[in-house]
Amino acid sequence: MFTDREFFMRSHGQVRFLTISATLQKRVFYSVAGALALWLIVTLAMMVNQLTVTGERMALAEKEAAVNSTESRVASYKQSIEGVAADLQQRQDVLDQMTEQFVGEQPAASDKNQSDEKLSENTRKISAAFPEAAHLAKIEARQILFARRLTMAAVQRTEQAEEAIRKFGLNPDKLAKNSTNAMGGPLIPFFKDQDQQLHPTFERLNLALQRMDALERTLIAIPSGQPSSTGLITSSFGYRRDPFTGGSAMHSGIDFKGPKGQPILAAAGGRITHAGWKSGYGKAVEITHGNGLMTRYAHLSRIDVAAGQRIEQGLQLGAMGSTGRSTGTHLHFEVRLNGRAINPRPFLEANTDVLKIKAIARQRASTPTRAESGTSRG
């Protein structure tokens, strides 16, 4: 299959020979075959992952339908009305905790709206079979309806956060994975009975709220504030002619020109991981925002923060200067993802809709719960 091959080309009365060796043919063949094999493996892995996620969702939906079926609930009511009452109370505790943790306050439904709700088939059958349990059946239907509505609201907010993150040019799934891959702590079962499991309706709600929380916190961590009020950009991200050597060089950030002493502001909240001199950057500040994101502010004339300090978006980090490898007073601003420099421009040019979604997420995350604020109900 692979032998030395010669090709003859005639042009203007001249004959030329082109030889393709067997070794070169093998290299080309195996390179193409390897690339195709790698593509097939990646595609297969993505398909398997998608099928697994879809299968898990379908299984959970089937489990929910079975638990919520008329026969299942009638059997539960027959066993013990007291047990059902305790179960409903425990569910309400779960609902209150989930809503308090992820939404900040429980949405109130008026009695009029509840009276206008048509009872489900399960509720009518249970009420007819056990008149004394009719009130409990209505409470259960009300809780399940509440949980489903809250699940839909969480899914909608999750989709909005995903779309906003994509508009920054980032992958929401990868960033969210970075935020949830470090967990720990002692095992404290939620239920006293180790064999008791969370109702599937509320399990779906919990999963929806967990993903919403992870993506909204990821969105909050993305730098979108202006690091300086001056809008004059003197050098963009990418390849450029080096101002000192004149040769080609990679510029890993954006340069903002301004007067010495111009306030430099944090583009997003996070933790200061460097505040001091850094090689060619001169006086520099680095902020780690989580999810692999980091911003760098270089060539400062003064630094106003310290390493280890936690700061919010808009806090003054220092003042513009010309320290380090610099030809004049300016700010060198970088955004890095997992240590790799990326173009900061999409972060600085986020549209109003994206910033509005981010502001709503920040308000939810910063609102203290009743437990945190120390308030209690009389």
Image (tube, rainbow, N blue to C red):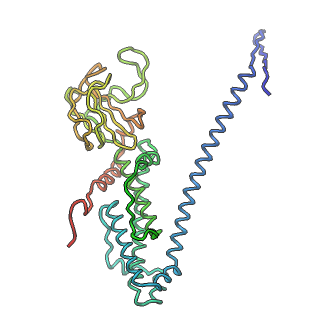
Query: For residue 190, which quarter of the picture?
Result: bottom left
Q: Is residue 114 left or right of residue 127?
A: left
* Nearer to the camera, 229 or 85: 85
Give residue 64's position: percent from left, percent from top: 51, 70
Give residue 81's position: percent from left, percent from top: 41, 84
Q: Quadrant of the N terminus?
A: top right
Report the label total. 0
Query: For residue 203, which quarter of the picture?
Result: bottom left
In the depicted structure, whether residue 207 falls above or below residue 10: below
In the depicted structure, whether residue 2 falls above or below residue 81: above
Query: For residue 106, which quarter of the picture?
Result: bottom left
Give residue 14's position: percent from left, percent from top: 77, 9
Residue 201 in view of the camera:
no
* Nearer to the camera, 139 or 330: 139
In the image, what residue occupies the spot 20% across and 26% down? 260
In the image, what residue occupies the spot 67% across and 32% down? 32
Q: Quadrant of the C terminus?
A: bottom left
Residue 324 in view of the camera:
yes
Give residue 353's position: percent from left, percent from top: 36, 50
